[in-house]
Amino acid sequence: MAVRVTMERFDPGAETNAFLAAAGGAGAAVTFTGLVRSTPDLPVTTLTLECYPELAINQLDALIDDANARFDLLAATILHRYGVLQVGEPIVQVMTLSAHRGAAFQGAEFLMDYLKTDAPFWKQETGPQGTNWVEAHDADDAARARWK
Amino acid sequence: MTILYFAWLRERLNRGSEEVNPPDSVVTIADLIDWLAARDAAFAHAVAKRSLIRSARDARLVPHDTPINGASVIAFFPPMTGG
């Protein structure tokens, strides 16, 4: 399954092993895992992700088709959680497979840059300062724009 | 037609969805936003900055000039912040 949008916590190691087990003769796999962040400057206790699942699946499927065509990937998978998450828990995992590492790295970065701005998830942070919706960042739009 | 709302738009409107029957003069998603805003001050206030409102037609991301003719579900939401 190339796209999974779920409220269940996933195990990044198990997901990676399953992806690698189906690699066949591909020479390169890249996996990226995004985790719930908390820093001394911006302490967070929980992160709540809202999602529009039907649209998320359509958007992520289309992104994978785009990435496969652009970078000649042999396989690509995106896992994305929603619901209430604790600090350190995995939010998103992107995995790419290709004959050589360049395409696998580029494909993973492309998928992450696009899903930040184009997949219907909305983050709400709770910490000592209260609960706030995370605002969209210009830096994310800039990261996406470089792939045009 | 079902309208869905997400994130801070859902919170400001105090509802995640509603059923509406817009008249034939409402042709595009932009028209639908205007029509909803005209009957609901809270909606008008929440969508005052139109550039912050994204839209989807039957679970496909679409721009505001998209026709709504034949659509079952229209969704409105703020810029996305996943990943």
Image (cartoon, grey):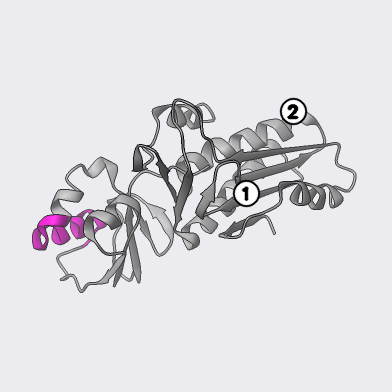
Q: Amino acid at mark 1?
A: Asp
- In the image, residue A116 lies at what x, y percent? 49, 40
Q: Which residue is mark 1?
A: A65
Magenta stretch containing residue B35, yes or no? yes
Give the foreground label among 1 and 2: 2
Discs 1, 2: same chain: yes
- The dot on residue A102 is 2
Q: Quadrant of residue A35?
A: top right
Location of the N terminus of chain B (image quadrant): bottom left
Against B29, residue A24 (above or below) is above
Q: Quadrant of residue B13?
A: bottom left
- In the image, residue A97 lies at what x, y percent? 77, 42
Q: Calculate the distance from the C-alpha at mark 1 to the C-alpha at mark 2.
A: 18 Å
Numbered disc total: 2
Residue lying farthest front?
A128
Q: Amino acid at mark 2?
A: Gly
Q: Secondary structure at mark 2?
A: helix
Mark earlier in primary sequence (1, 2): 1
Residue range in magenta is B27-42
Q: Is residue B29 left or right of residue A51?
A: left
- In the image, residue B26 lies at what x, y percent? 18, 63
Say which residue appears at 34% left-offset and 42% top-offset: A130
Residue lying farthest right?
A25
Q: Chain of mark 1?
A: A
Q: Chain of mark 2?
A: A
Mark 1, other Cα within 10 Å: few <14 / some 14–19 / many ≥20: few
Q: Is residue A33 left or right of residue A122?
A: right
